[in-house]
Image (tube, rainbow, N blue to C red):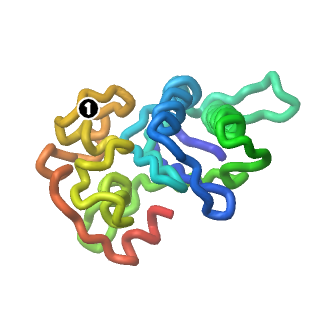
Amino acid sequence: MDFIKENIYHIYNRGNNKQSIFFTEGNYIYFLQKVRKYIIPHCDILAYALMPNHFHFLIHADERTEKQLTDLKMNRNVLSEGIRLLLSAYTKGINKQQERTGNLIQQNTKSKCVTEVSNMNGQGYATTCFHYIHQNPLMAGFVNKIEDWHYSSYRDYAGLRKGTLCNQQLAKELLGIQIDDVKQKRIFSDESLKNIW
């Protein structure tokens, strides 16, 4: 994956064969600890949601994100390498916990630039993606209220938790998001959603 500074990207992946990747509450926490170690040094996270069999991140690329690792046989982007290390370390831990072997998560993590793309209402797809990520647990039927899902950044933006994983100030500046916007339920058209994938 290549990343260009000042752009916003939707990064996502799911369990191999759509299998679960989180089995306990501790697994979600362990994954987020790995995110702090391997992802935060290379970009700003604007939003995230961890679901039982997949995950979403909305990130903002900057100078840190564009850097290349040159100590490998091939040049590799630092964030791409961070994602690889995150998933490798997490899979190793889960495989030990679940007494399993092999791939837990699909091999190719997806990344889509959602900067400067607007839908018919003039709302940017980065903003659509931000709200979609937070509403994913509700739309999937895991909770009756968005705030009841503990494994996303929604509770931080809604003022229900003091999480530090997301750069909330940057998200508000880049996406024009207000607290009331976060709390609104949005209905997404198939047309607007296909542009965040």
Which image quadrant is residue 128 in?
bottom left
Give the camera-side residue of 193 and 158.
Answer: 158
The location of residue 98, given as percent across then percent down, is 67, 42
Q: Nearer the viewer, residue 152 or 111?
A: 152
Residue 185 rendering spot, x and y as whole percentages: 19, 62
**Quadrant assignment, res 122:** bottom left
The amino acid type, in three-letter code, at marker 1 is Gln
Q: In this view, does 150 lie above or below 139?
A: above
Name the outermost residue toward the front: 99
Q: What element carries label 1?
A: helix
Q: Residue furthest right?
A: 73
Q: Label 1: few (<14), some or many (≥20) within 10 Å? A: few
Nearer-the-camera pick, 72 or 36: 36
- The answer to whether residue 177 is left or right of residue 111 is left
189 with respect to 10 (left or right): left
Q: x, y percentage for residue 163?
A: 31, 29
Q: Quadrant of residue 4?
A: top right
Q: Name the residue under label 1.
A: 169
Q: Which residue is drawn at 70% across and 40% down?
A: 95
State the image coordinates of residue 134 (x, y, percent, origin top left).
Answer: 32, 52
65 left or right of 122 in image: right
Residue at x 53% of width, y 46% of height: 23
